[in-house]
Amino acid sequence: MKALSAALLLALLACAQQPASTPAGLDGAWLGAIEVPPAIKLRLVFHVAGPVATMESLDQNARDIPVSEVIRSGSTVIFDMPKIGGRFEGRIDPALATIAGTWSQGGNSFPLTLSRVKDASSLQLRRPQEPKRPYPYRDEDVSYDNRPAGIKLAATFTIPVGKGPFPAVLLITGSGQQDRDEAIMGHKPFLVLADYLTRHGIAVLRADDRGVGKSGGTFATATTADFATDAEAGLAYLKTRPEVDPHRIGLIGHSEGGIIAPMVAARNRDVAFIVLLAGTGLPGYEVVVDQVRSMYEAEGISGKQLADLTARHREIVEIFRSEKDEAVVAQKIRERMAGKLSDAEINVAIARTQGPWARYFIEYDPAPALRRVTCPVLALIGGKDTQVPPALNLPPIRAALRAGGNKGFQVAELPGLNHLFQSAKTGAPGEYGLIEETMSPMALDRVSSWITAHESSSTDARK
């Protein structure tokens, strides 16, 4: 899953305060990275111009976050950001080239060394696959209601050129607060995917999660089951569009969306097909432990150290499953992990056990829903996916579909691709923002060609 920044999400804030004096020797851009457990690197950049400074988190696409105070006293440098609970304190070297210190936020502290950036333009992220207007198709900002939940969802609908009605898909985001582009680490995977599919004759609807962007509702109290009802609202909306063939509407779910798509298809037999991109086949309590193990392994950790870390996180999950009270869970995790994990690792682990979403996800087993899916299914996982390892998740997906009698499914591992379906070296989440590619052409073509082939054959069968 994409739960990369739940404990450390950097909010965009305004109203910077300016100190009276101008710190010497700090003007320019300063780049460094903190390592958030397990094995996630977040690059931070401080832009300093006299007494005024801003920060950006490159990998979270968070920019222009004001630093309320910039202080230099001798070799000591402080960037204070009380409104987000953040503070960097370090010592600048005599050559004024590096500042070695500590980033603190939310009760956690991380080593951070900032280096002066000679060319600030080099920090600009290159995302060559992102489409630029004018598009060779129509796009509309739309909204629709999830009436049982009493919320309105905001979305973008893209319609191919030519005479319809067209096949259509609803894109379903992964875990965490996602906008309609599923923006992560400076990438917009759903924008790229929607653009590709629409250029290939498939209409696409993609929505902001509830409580995110322009969508109503509250994200914090929602579970995977709630997001499934949001997907059903999107499915219902597509049926109202004259450009869409109501017999050729499918779902594409990424990560947690790959859990939601079978839930929806299992109880809505008019779903024509589903595509699972890095969807899980195991119960949540197994997924989270395997995820931690794979992510540490991708960072080069092995042997006894890897076994010990995996065992500790398995114990954390067992504590969570055995206790229903969140305060008791937090207390027991602190007691049992003291001296075994760092304070930051413990804090992140506790954060991941809080709220109704975590409880639902940990206990949810996708197999029963998969067994009830009768429509064609394409399930893909990247060979270097460390968040949903293919060797652990593809076999149970295949087994569940076969057990349910589904005869129209394809299950495949795409070599060399990570959780975002980028061409990757290690597959570690820390790479996501460093890779210019947003989604591999191999993955884009595999999805598009499978949908086109399936819809062509189903159309011929109806004639």
Image (tube, rainbow, N blue to C red):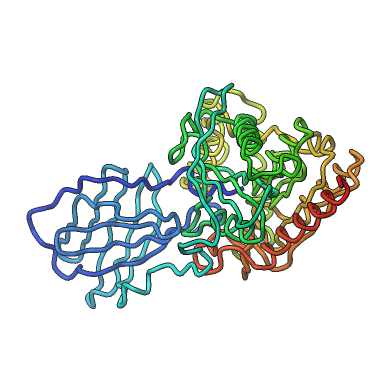
Residue 225 point in image, percent of width and height: 64, 30
Question: Quadrant of residue 298 in the image?
Answer: bottom right
In the picture provided, is 139 more to the left or to the right than 169?
left
Q: So how many labels did they put on this image?
A: 0
Looking at this view, is 433 or 248 the one in front?
Answer: 248
Q: Residue at position x 70%, y 64% from top?
A: 445
Q: Residue furthest left?
A: 20
In the picture provided, is 283 more to the left or to the right than 356?
right
Residue 357 point in image, percent of width and height: 58, 32
Residue 142 point in image, percent of width and height: 50, 40
Q: Residue at position x 65%, y 39% from top?
A: 315
Looking at this view, is 388 or 212 the one in front?
Answer: 212
Q: Is residue 312 visible?
A: no
Q: Residue at position x 71%, y 35% from top?
A: 264
Q: Is residue 225 visible?
A: yes
Residue 151 point in image, percent of width and height: 50, 27
